[in-house]
Amino acid sequence: MNGILNWILWLPIIGMVGIILTPKAKENVIRMMTLVTTSITLILSILLYLKFDTSTADMQFVTKLPWISQFHINYFIGIDGITMLMTFLNALLFFICTLSSWTVTKNIKAYFALLLMLQSTVFGVFFSLDFFLFYVYWEVMLLPMFFLIGIWGGENREYAAIKFFLYTFFGSIFMLVGIIALYYASGKGVDSFNILAHQGGKFTELQVNVFGKSFSFEHLFFWFMFLGFAIKVPVFPFHTWLPHAHVQAPTAVSVILAGVLLKMGTYGFLRIAFPIFPQAAVEYSTIIAVLGLISVIYGAFCAMAQDDVKKLIAYSSVSHMGFVMLGLSAMTTQGMNGAVLQMFNHGTSTAMMFLLIGILYERSHHRWIVKPDGSKGYGGLSTKLPKYTTVFIIGMFASLGLPGLSGFISEALIFLGIYEKFTTITVIAVVGLLIGAAYLLWMFKRMFFGEVNPETEDYEDMNAREVFYMIPLCICVIVFGIFPSPLLNVMKASVGQLVDLLSKY
Amino acid sequence: MEYTVGNIAPIFLSPVIAFVINAFFGRKLPRQGDWLATLSIFISFIFSARIFGDFVFGTFATDFFIHKTFTWFDLSHGANIWKVDMGIYIDNMAAIMLLMVSGVAFLIHLFSTWYMDHDEKHGRFFVFLPLFTSAMLGLVLSDNLFSLFIFWEIMGFCSYSLIGIYNKKEAAGDASLKAFMTTRVGDVFLLLGMVAIWMVIGSVAYVDIYAAIAEGKFAGQTVIGISLATFAGLCIFLGGMGKSAQFPLHVWLPDAMMGPTPGSALIHAATMVAAGVYLSLRMYPLMVLGDLTWFIAVIGAITAFGAATIALVQTDIKAVLAFSTISQLGYMMIGVGVGSYNAAFMHLITHAIFKACLFLSAGSVIHSVHEQEMPKLGGLRKYLPYTHFAMMCCTLAIAGIPFFSGFVSKDRILGDALYFGFIAGQNPLLAIVPILGFAGAGLTAFYMFRMMFLTFYGENRMGHHDSHGDEHAHGDHHHGHDIHHEHLDARSNVPLLILSVFTLGVWFAGSLTGQGIVKVFGEKTEWFKILVEAPKVERFVKHPREAFGSTDSRVKAELPKAKYDHQSGYAGPNPDDHKIHSAHVVGAWMSIVIAFLGVFIAFLMYIKKSIKPLASMFPGYTETLKNKYYFDNLYVDVIIKKGLLGLNRFLSWFDMGIFDRFAVDGWAAVNRVLFKASKWFDNVVVDAIGVDGTGVAVNLFNLVLRIVQSGKIQFYFIMLIVVLASYIWTVNI
């Protein structure tokens, strides 16, 4: 039984090895191998969902093998409700990205090998219950990302790749210090790298001496962890790597970046920062909420000023992830569930947006709503591309939180969650909803309405492959907008456990 | 027969099914599925009619209601119980509303099958029309604010799609964006108000809110310094203002006529805009508790009068109707504000019927003559006799001519407003409400008859119009100007005639003085007044939510004999029956005189031509009116283009140009200095002293840097050193 999780984790690596062994010239074989690997992973993750026991908050499908036994480092993986959703999201998005990458021509072998490696490492981050393993996956994940952006990216790709790499690395160094500190603080014993064993507020009394002064261990290292995760989310003011990375990254990598990698940041809060340092988390929740609020508003305002569609969506990710941070800072049932649901829903809706921009980019080779010379980049697309327009409308309205589509429920839950604790912040945050609708609809108006731009005259509508890979996301966005229970039931026990823990402080 | 979900849900579900089928297979169906959409609404109508019949002719007590709930999703874990319930709540008001919405929507669908024939957007139109109707029906069936909000927003989406349906036009894009965003301003406040109520009293079901009001759960609760009831009430009313196009959120509605005319009839006249009024009525006890009624009345009065003045100078037949819609919605809000609960709701119903008919008639005119600028029309009475008849009935109704429905409802609102403004002894400044209300009534009669006279009377001016390029891009692509005589047709003018029958006041059992001279339903004199009254919150306390479970609160009882609370306001000003009666009598006569005066002036101006048109008398003011008091300019040019976009551009520039460039990438420069310093330290200090061993780290470091050759990589390594150094300090546990 527990084998499924290991298969999900290692299958992409097997696929990667297979691709490496395949001759470079056999491009279609490489593509098919990737597709088969990702589709098996997707099927396995659906099986995992079906076998998942929603009644318990405990870790399931646990595997624990000794790895570096001198330091009590284990190969220790397992999932709970939160990671169940992330697993499914990750498997789904990589499957879709494989299909969307069909048109990549530059060095296909390396591209797909790195893509599969990325998938495995992302799974690894979500599955790891051992701190050392977690850190290894967290860092190794940067490697394929760095190359995927740096080699297959846009004009300014090297700058963006290095910036992404350094910024994230900068944060993870702090996280590493936190991990080592926890190792020492827990007495270098059997469970000193066990994430689960650290949870539950075990370090509230501990003091440390830094530069000769005594600090609360919990409060100090909460910030170390915070920095590591906040950069990944990204929370204002650590967000500036994101627009660069998104604009330069190839479509599939943008989808993965916005769809899953950003969730690793908020996942870090849920799995590590909050449960291990609950007292500090509760104490500093106002700061988290304020940063979340600034992300929401600031991201939305910046998005509205963008002329590059991809940059616009990148800033909208900052804004939407700000909602997740708001929900986390609430530390209530509604807010936390809303935050996790928003992680999933943002994953699907923003993936749709990035894929759609990618589809358009393949036709236009630019992404300007308004070109730098002031002329229209697009215009009248709805006349030329009816299928594309329909899917775009679904993705866009899911993104702006239209009831009946997925984004609404998570945003509503987040608002319900934060209201009691941060009323003023709630009142200000609704501006984010307003601006969120404004920039998307304004973009839509400028791109899709009006006379057909002569430049867009020969664009083809979405082909069968493109329609095929958008369908699962459309289904996710619509079905989970009307019936959120399949998602909420999976997560609520795990989230509830965290809420209960935090409510004690 | 018992009420089950099975015989209520089809009201909502059948149009949804039509939407789904049309969305996926519409193109393959004969006539692109328009018959399916129409049929689905007819099914809704049948089920609604049954409920209506039971509520009006049945033996239910007047306060009977159906309340059924089910759990949508459940976040409970352990002892922490929290779930979201959805449900159906039907009381008299909802029953009447259901019948009106489904009936009017059916006729509009029927008309549209004729109107949209051969239109390139025929199929698309019949995708969104049933979805829209189902959302409105769902909204009426909702038992709580949350599901109301969901349907509320879906309607917003449908109206966005229908306004922008002619997607080749830039103006259609602007109009749909404007409609969605303006109403969204109200919507986010509605969400906020809902969240506030939910988190304080634990539920947003109407019955729970009423019970909480009666139990005093709102007492002492504050939100950012103001009382919860005021805050939540204001937020919810702001939501209503957005949807119901109240000043200052009215700007979207006139532009919304970019869509096809039957769409305007459904969305921007009969149903969607009524949702805001419906919400205000549902939340009336909260508005009273939050002391917001005077505010609602004032907003309503400003809207009613202001929109009427703008309508005076409009030349586009649809624009006149659009502004008259805003104005009439203002009257409904006055009704809510002055405690005229029953009349406000009645005006909602009467207005829905005559305004739908007016828009359809306008559609009929436009479709027949391919022209919607009134100065280019005229004398159409001969060619379009049925349309003329229907439109005249509706115009008489909206103008407030006795024996027509508009008179019955508006007269009561104005009578109560008169009492509210002058007699109830409140702030004397509130006298502005009846003053603006009566003035607006006169203007309404004038501009509606101006429209009638310009369109249907006088000479036909179709032959000799000069320019065709008016600034209003027409919603309908038709060319050619030959007028055909209208024939009686089941799809084009029968819906108009059916609707025009219901512009008669007798259906609503009104009378000249609101005293009930006309008896239609025998025993149930003044059925409307008996059935619709402000929720008496106390009775909901006795029936806590759990007690209903999922069954009807089926109380069979004798209808109370025509005894109703005249003011029918919860905790409103203690009504003095005699004074109210006097106010009503005076109000009725005043409205009659004012209405006839308006019609008479219009007659003199446009038929006799013995008075010069207004425009020549006040050129400056006319210019202001033509620019709609410059609200569009204020919002778009100043607030959005200068304010919001300016701020956005500044922030975006700051983010990338300042913050990212200096605060983030700037570390590279800092680092370069550190790098040089360490190099100097290495070369000069370390080597000079000759302790080679200590320089190894720095040498290694330099080596790495030389390999990487990037300004920013250095930063990371410096940080690594700093962090590791601090780590060495921290491990002293």
Image (tube, helix red, strand yellow):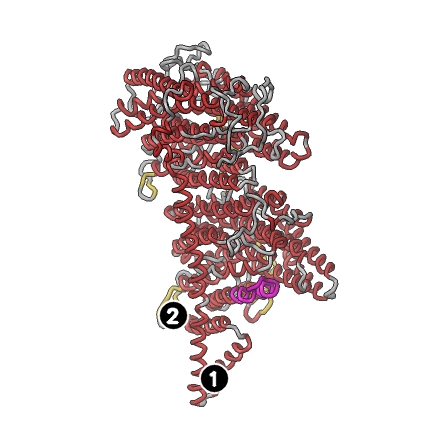
Please state the horizontal and vertical placement of residue B551, each as a whole percent of the image.
Answer: 51, 26
| B162 to A16, vertically: above or below | above
Please state the horizontal and vertical placement of residue A3, each as a whole percent of the image.
Answer: 66, 56
Tell me if residue B296 can be seen: yes
Task: Give whichever of B367, A307 is nearer the camera.
Answer: B367
* Labels 1 and 2 positioned on one and the same chain: no
Pick the quarter of the image with the N terminus of chain B: top right
Tell me if residue B538 can be seen: no
Q: Which mark is residue A209?
A: 2
What residue does disc 1 label? B695
Task: Give whichever of B107, B701 is nearer the camera.
Answer: B107
| A293 to B184, vertically: above or below | below
Task: Give whichever of B18, B371 is nearer the camera.
Answer: B371
Q: Nearer the viewer, mark 1 or mark 2?
A: 1
Residue type at numbered disc 1:
Gly
On the rendered structure, is A210 left or right of A458?
Answer: left
Chain of the residue that carries numbered disc 2 in the rendered image: A
Give the number of marks: 2
Please state the horizontal and vertical placement of residue B124, each as a whole percent of the image.
Answer: 60, 35
Sort mark 1 into few (<14), some (14-19) or many (20+) by Cα contacts within 10 Å. Answer: some
Look at the numbered disc 1 and give the secondary structure of its residue.
helix
Task: Give whichever of A497, B494 is nearer the camera.
Answer: B494
Residue type at numbered disc 2:
Asn
In magenta segment, residue A157: yes
In magenta segment, residue A30: no
Which segment is the magenta one? A141-163
Pick the quarter of the image with the C terminus of chain B: bottom left
Q: Give the Cα separation between the discs numbered 1 and 2.
A: 29 Å
The secondary structure that most of the magenta stretch takes on is helix
Chain of the residue that carries numbered disc 1 in the rendered image: B
| A505 to B499, vertically: above or below | below
